[in-house]
Image: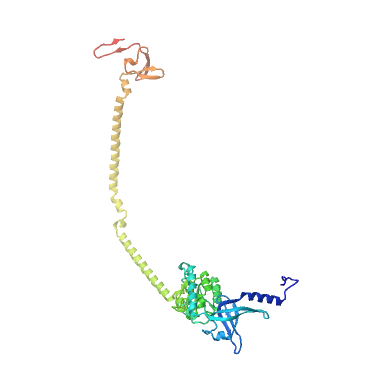
């Protein structure tokens, strides 16, 4: 075992290469899935060469195998075929490269692809990526439409021509990418990210014509589906024809049956909109004319009424009545005041006649016995025994006196001094 390398004692290249080969050797045999991007089978050669590419990332791996594995494959292998390869990785120390020596190659059939897509669809649905509440509304009239499609494809022609027929002023930002094969997903992701960052782009359209399940496989890629959900710009999926349903249709904000249908749904029809505006203007004008006519008739009816023809006539007719009512009211008030004054005078005379002051004025007096500070009215002889201090109140004042004696008067006897 060599000691760790250092600046003073570095490892030679051969040591590093051998150690890398040893580590790779420990990995053992593995199963690898990918898309075939290159096949090289030379006549008379003992080794065939392939390149496997990851469908969702810009990564590839060199593969070597016996030519019989390719020739005897139950399904012909072509560039873009999806395969599962079993083999062992080898590191070539002389060139410093890694390759996979394949011992078995299994093409991925349509049935297996569909089963995988169903499992992925169930996974994305369970995560809520198909939820309608996540769908963003498509703007009525986008400033700029981003279009991701194949170069010079029928889908590009359909979208551009139909959209411009409907709304000639529409603007497009077109990004041409591969729409199938191993490079499709990375290129679509790059174009989608670029258009999503553009503030002028209000909606993005993914467009492709029809094809087989393998041809449309890129638009069911999990990485692309998650990128569509994560985008901030509304995205329209217009992949294939009506029966085609890649997973991008479920995660996109709007699913169009065809590229032509997408063009019809992202921009309004100028002719139809102008006709609608003209119809609304006519309806508004008719409604305004009807309102003016109704209000004019109402004003004519109001002007024909007598009260508006001579507004002061009603007041003039009521002048005599108002004056009569004022005189009657004044007379009633004066009568009420006179009656009440007479009544008050009579009550005052009655009160004066029965009051104590009038009684005293007729010669009567009020006798009070003085006991300390208190005074008690004398009602009977017994209330003022001889020697009591008395206070006699008359009409114009009071006299102090003392009780010298008492007499009891009866109706049948004379005064008897006591």
Figure colour scheme:
rainbow
User: Is 71 or 363 nearer to us in this picture?
Assistant: 71
The image quarter in which residue 97 lies: bottom right
Residue 264 at x, y percent in the picture: 45, 76
Q: Position of residue 125 (x, y in %)?
A: 47, 69
What residue do we see at 63% from left, 74% from top? 26
Q: Is residue 409 left or right of residue 374?
A: left
* Residue 236 visible from this viewpoint: no
Residue at figure coordinates x 57%, y 86% from the top left = 68
Most distant residue in the top direction: 417
Q: Position of residue 399 (x, y in %)?
A: 37, 16
Q: Position of residue 61 (x, y in %)?
A: 60, 79
Q: Is residue 282 visible?
A: yes
Q: In the image, is 24 to the left or to the right of 386?
A: right
| Horizontal relation, residue 106 to residue 290: left or right | right
The quadrant where residue 377 appears: top left
């Amino acid at each position: 075992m060599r000691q760790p390398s250092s600046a003073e004692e570095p490892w030679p290249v051969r040591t590093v290469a051998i150690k890398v080969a040893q580590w790779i050797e420990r990995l053992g045999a593995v199963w690898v899935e990918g898309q075939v991007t290159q096949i090289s089978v030379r006549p008379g050669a003992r080794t065939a060469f392939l390149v496997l590419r990851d469908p969702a990332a810009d990564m590839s791996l060199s593969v070597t195998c016996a030519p019989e594995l390719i020739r005897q494959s139950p399904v012909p292998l072509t560039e873009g075929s999806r395969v599962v390869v079993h083999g062992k990785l080898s590191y070539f120390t002389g060139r410093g490269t890694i390759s996979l020596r394949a011992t078995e190659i299994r093409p991925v059939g349509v049935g297996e692809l569909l089963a995988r897509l169903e499992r992925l669809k169930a996974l994305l649905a369970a995560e809520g990526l198909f939820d309608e509440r996540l769908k963003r509304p498509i703007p009525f009239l986008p400033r700029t439409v981003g279009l991701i499609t194949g170069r010079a494809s029928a889908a590009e022609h359909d979208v551009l021509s139909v959209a411009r027929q409907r709304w000639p002023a529409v603007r497009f930002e077109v990004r041409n990418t591969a729409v199938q094969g191993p490079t499709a997903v990375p290129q679509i992701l790059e174009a989608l990210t670029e258009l999503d960052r553009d503030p002028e782009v209000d909606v993005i359209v993914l467009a492709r014509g029809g094809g087989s399940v393998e041809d449309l496989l890129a638009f069911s890629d999990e990485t692309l589906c998650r990128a569509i959900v994560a985008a901030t710009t509304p995205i329209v999926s217009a992949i294939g024809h009506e029966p085609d349903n890649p997973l991008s249709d479920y995660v996109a904000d709007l699913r169009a049956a065809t590229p032509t249908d997408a063009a019809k749904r992202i921009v309004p029809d100028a002719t139809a909109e102008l006709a609608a505006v003209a119809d609304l203007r006519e309806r508004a004008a008719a409604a305004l004319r009807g309102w003016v006519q109704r209000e004019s008739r109402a004003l004519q009816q109001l002007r024909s009424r007598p009260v508006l023809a001579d507004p002061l006539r009603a007041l003039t007719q009521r002048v005599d009545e108002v004056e009569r009512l004022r005189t009657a009211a004044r007379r009633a008030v004066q009568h009420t005041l006179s009656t009440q004054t007479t009544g008050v005078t009579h009550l005052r005379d009655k009160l004066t006649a029965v009051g104590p002051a009038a009684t005293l004025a007729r010669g009567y007096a009020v006798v009070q016995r003085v006991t300390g500070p208190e005074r008690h009215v004398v009602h009977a002889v017994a209330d003022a025994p001889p020697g009591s201090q008395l206070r006699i109140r008359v009409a114009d004042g009071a006299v102090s006196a003392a009780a010298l004696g008492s007499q009891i008067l009866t109706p049948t006897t004379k005064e008897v001094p006591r």
